[in-house]
Image (tube, rainbow, N blue to C red):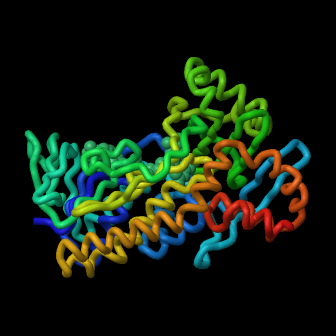
Amino acid sequence: MYDVIVVGARCAGAATALLLARQGVRVLLTDRAAFPSDTISTHLLHPTGVARLRAWGLLDPLLATGCPSIDTISFRAAEDLVLRGAPYPCDGVAVSLAPRRTVLDALLVEAAVAAGAELREGASFQEVIWEDGRAVGAAFGGRGGGRSGGFTERAALIIGADGRHSAVARQVGAKPIRDAGTFGCQFYGYWQGLPNVGTQIFVGGGQAVLAYPTHDEHHLVLVGWPHARFAEVKQDLDRHFLAAVAASAPAIAEQLTDATRTGSITGSGDLGNYVRESSGPGWVLVGDAAAAKDPVTAQGIGDAFAQAQSVGDRLASALAGGPGAVDAAMAAHGVDWERGGRAAFETTVAFAMGGNSARLLPVLRAIERRPELISMFYGVYAGQFTVEEFFAAVG
Ligand SMILES: Cc1cc2nc3c(=O)[nH]c(=O)nc-3n(C[C@H](O)[C@H](O)[C@H](O)COP(=O)(O)OP(=O)(O)OC[C@H]3O[C@@H](n4cnc5c(N)ncnc54)[C@H](O)[C@@H]3O)c2cc1C
């Protein structure tokens, strides 16, 4: 018998399991995948997310894996306009990180298990078990925990952390609260041999190029296009990718000619922006299962951490109060989370639509020599400020 069953064991599920298990909650952590393993996602983590890892005691172990710190961002908005700076520090943490998901997710899973969570990999969630209108358990297929033919477990709360296409959300009938649409697609690859100069962003010509250092002396290089180009780009990915880098980021293109690419270029056009109803009787959703945004602002992993913290802070004491207390605590979490994330959601959607571009360029020229406003601009990406707060500060 468990207090909670967590479906999905990456940055939302494993972090939630970790925080609950550390408080003595009996956690069953499940995933159809096994760890370490990769997932389709780039992996920039702003200082806000890095600060959470530090608070959880996981920053030093992550740095010990050889994850390079990123202390500078350069943003080339036009040929004659490059802004250099960093977001404001968060709780004393000034750096960003870009850990490979193979490393970050496995670190979170290991920490959850070390805290007492039971892990079942290869466990594919099938359906919620209901009793009197309340979720009281979950049925799994696959070979989770060595059990061939599937298994069923009961718990006071089912936590759906199973990503964008959450089967838990479908099973519990979580209603859409917002669906703002899909505006972008992103593709990325890894190269060895680029100099570490922090995160480099190049925008213009209807596309964006990003490069940042990650594990094993590799750089991730990414191209973002409007979603309207998804089908065309996919037909000849390498050609379109390298042409976009050459057109928008010639400095990176030159570096790539001497660098070694590892693996193929991959990515996704499945970047819709939505918020779902996040809790109900005996269930709660966290991470992309609850809400997701276009990765243009790179907030997904940090959002998952923040939701894990919010659930972790409320649930342990509520469990002692029985089902009503658990549902009330998760409803309060959902209301706070949705309200707190509204501005970042709108800002991200505006960036994803390219809606700010015309307004932005003269503003960026005006702040070229004002480091505090450059930090605030990067803070918009990091979720520290809304774009309206930034425009207001520029005056
Ligand atoms: C192209 C792209 C680039 C991105 N770049 C960034 C970035 O730079 N920075 C950033 O912060 N965010 C980025 N994101 C967003 C980020 O990837 C997500 O917000 C984050 O992964 C959400 O974590 P999660 O744990 O909620 O879900 P996921 O990481 O999707 O994990 C869900 C887990 O659930 C498991 N699962 C699913 N269904 C089942 C089932 N039926 N049974 C059992 N297990 C199941 C899966 O195996 C998976 O392990 C990007 C996303 C994309 C697509």
Q: Where is residue 160? Give x, y as percent.
A: 30, 55
Q: Going by the image, does 326 lie left or right of 42?
A: left
Q: Position of residue 11 (x, y in %)?
A: 40, 57
- Residue extending farthest to the top is 235
Q: Residue at x 66, y 24 (%)?
A: 240
User: From the viewer's perspective, is residue 21 above or below residue 321?
Assistant: above
Classify residue 143 as left or right of residue 72. left
Note whether 262 is above or below 53 in the view shown. Answer: above
Q: Quadrant of the C terminus?
A: bottom right
The image position of residue 390, as x and y in percent, is: 75, 65
Q: Is residue 42 visible?
A: no
- Depth order, front residue of 180/365: 180
**Image position of 320 (left or right of 164):** left
- Where residue 379 appears, as percent x and y from the top left, is 68, 64
Residue at horizontal 58 percent and vertical 53 percent from the top: 298
- Left or right of 48? Residue 132 is left
